[in-house]
Every structure is written in C-alpha cells, then in structure tokens.
Image: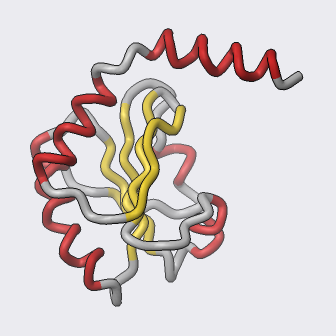
Amino acid sequence: MATIDITKENFRSQIPDSGIALIDFWAEWCMPCNRFTPIYESAAQRHPDVVFGKVNTDEQQELAAGFKIRSIPSLVVFRDGVIMYEKAGILNGRQLDALIENVKNTDMQAVQNTISTTLSHNQ
C-alpha cells in the first residue's frame, strides 16, 4: 500500500475508528526525514492493513501545531482512534515493524478501561 498525503482537510477521514494508522510528520528539507522515507514506505508495503500517512509540516503547519510537533521526523501511531505512540526520530525497519506488531497486539479493551478510569478520576 502506498503512503497517503495527510492534510487538515482529509485528516479525520484517513484515521480509522477501527484499525491502525501511522502518521509521519516530515519536511522536504529535513535530511533525517529523507533517510526515514524509504524505511516508512517499505513498511507500508509490508503492512497493507495499516494506514501510512505523511504530513508535510511546511505545508500543514496548523496540523503539525495541533500535534505539538517540535522536531521532525515525528511519528504518531493511532489504533481505533487512540494515540498509542508519538515520538520524534528515526526508527529502522525492524523497530518500525516491532512497533506495529506491538500496537496490533495491544489489548484495546484494557486501553479503553484505563481511559475511562482516568477520565472518571479527573472529573
């Protein structure tokens, strides 16, 4: 599967309510971003059941600001609409595959229970 260009206009439609989406925040001038691109695109081919999106931070400044992106490349991973991972830096192919497998194997009922408990304690 190819990567998808994510904009503020299509963001919501590209993040599934059920399933996994990875969002790579990058810029054309960023050398680490350019090194990460082939790793990311290769992972997209290996994991066709996962959405792989790319946000150009120069063109989508509002979206990057909404995620408080301070350093690129930054990767944000969603599962079932919940942010499961967010971190700046480059992962190698093995690390990226392991991250995806960990997210796939996460007990989302436990995550939802934790979210519910946290929200009820904060009210």
Would residue 72 be found to the left or right of residue 62 on screen?
Answer: left
Q: Is residue 59 left or right of residue 106?
A: right
Q: Position of residue 35 (x, y in %)?
A: 18, 75
Quadrant showing the C terminus = top right
Q: Which residue is drawn at 22% across and 30% down?
A: 101
- Single out the residue that lies furthest toward the bottom: 29
Q: Where is residue 19 in the image (x, y as percent from the top left)?
A: 38, 28
Q: Image quadrant of residue 61?
A: bottom right
Name the residue rendered at 21%, 54% in the picture. Answer: 2
| Front residue of this view, candidates 93 and 2 | 93
Q: Nearer the viewer, residue 50 or 24?
A: 24
Say which quarter of the image contains residue 98: top left
> Measured from the top left, where is residue 5 in percent x and y?
39, 63
Q: Is residue 65 above or below residue 12?
A: below
Residue depicted at x 39% and y 56%: 75
Seen as rendered, the residue at the extreme front is 121
